[in-house]
Image: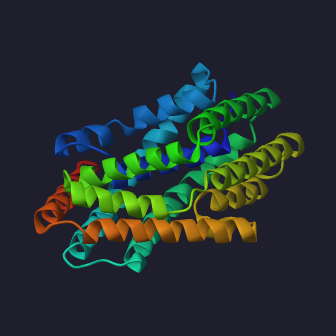
Amino acid sequence: MKGFSMRSAICLAKMVCLACIVVLAAGCSVVKLTYNNADTLTLLWLNRYVDLDAGQEAWTKDRVREFHVWHRVTQLPDYAQMLVRTRTLLQSPVTRADMLALNAEIAARLDVATIKALPDLATLALQLSPEQIAYMERKFEKNNTEFRKDFLDIDTEQRQENRYKTVLWLAEFWFGRFSAEQEAAIKRASYARPLINELWLSERLARQRDLIVVLKRIQAEKPSPHATLALLKDQAVRATGIANIPNAATRAEAEAAAAHAAQLAAAIVNLTTPEQRQRAMDKLQQWADDFVALSLEGR
């Protein structure tokens, strides 16, 4: 049976976790529908990166289902509590530090989900073939080409405008429509942030290169499951947060960019009206209630 990539397994954990925290859904029925189908959606996503044969697909489906059950029962109640705390946070002016702390909370939950996936990952990584690793490399190359096209092969003004439109779309998802004055303030704040598309591509390429090296080493040397787990844990830790970027200069630049993004998020929250904040708080409470209900369904 073929194995699937370490990157895929890490992304499996991230996708399920992120789907719960930041899934962009229109209402409670969509939240529940999305989560209840997360295992199927994850399997479809994995097939984009690995050519699953019948045996591998059955094995992977079982592991994804087990992960989903664990996640539903053990993680969703915690997510609900985090959302309730975030709702309380919105009742007063917020700071950049508040937003950074919220980012850290989300990152910590991604770490928990990633670590949960690693033991199965070690078993699968030992079964990777050279052909599979080459397949993954080609997929990375294709994705990187698309990234360059979307984020680098355009002029500075277009990069700024595209980012601003994304920021505005996300803000409107939470708070509803903004006035012209509010939109102008958001645009100024968005344009004030540094553009770091090249930085993200550089770090992305470095992670991919390191991952391929590790996978080729595992494929060639066939280390023990314990040693394999240790190798993959190093890669997983790097993939889960800015603080784990090994290059000091890159890490510092990424941390500065995260601080700018947190400042922008705080600025948007603080310019909202009471009605707009209430909309966001209602949505957070709705999601928290949904997560509690979903967790109880798994018991």
Q: Tell how many labels.
A: 0
Residue at 80%, 49% in the rendered image:
214
Residue 67 in sight from this viewpoint: no
Q: Residue 39 is drawn in which quadrant?
A: top left
Toward the viewer: 181 or 213?
181
Is 235 placed above or below 105 here?
above
Residue found at the very far top of the displayed protein: 54
Toward the viewer: 159 or 282?
159
Asked if residue 251 lies left or right of residue 223, the reply is left
Asked if residue 62 lies left or right of residue 142, the reply is left
Q: Position of residue 122 (x, y in %)?
A: 69, 49
Q: Position of residue 141 (x, y in %)?
A: 71, 33
Q: Position of residue 79 (x, y in %)?
A: 33, 62
Residue found at the very far right of the displayed protein: 221
Q: Residue 263 is drawn in which quadrant?
A: bottom left
Residue at 62%, 21% in the rendered image:
53
Q: Residue 256 is drawn in which quadrant?
A: bottom right
Residue 293 in sight from this viewpoint: yes
Is 250 placed above or below 199 here?
below
Toward the viewer: 238 or 267?
267
Q: Quadrant of the N terminus?
A: top right
* Colour setup of the view: rainbow
Residue at 55%, 33% in the rendered image:
46
Toward the viewer: 141 or 264?
264
Is 251 placed above or below 226 here?
below
Q: Where is residue 25 in the image (x, y as percent from the top left)?
A: 26, 43
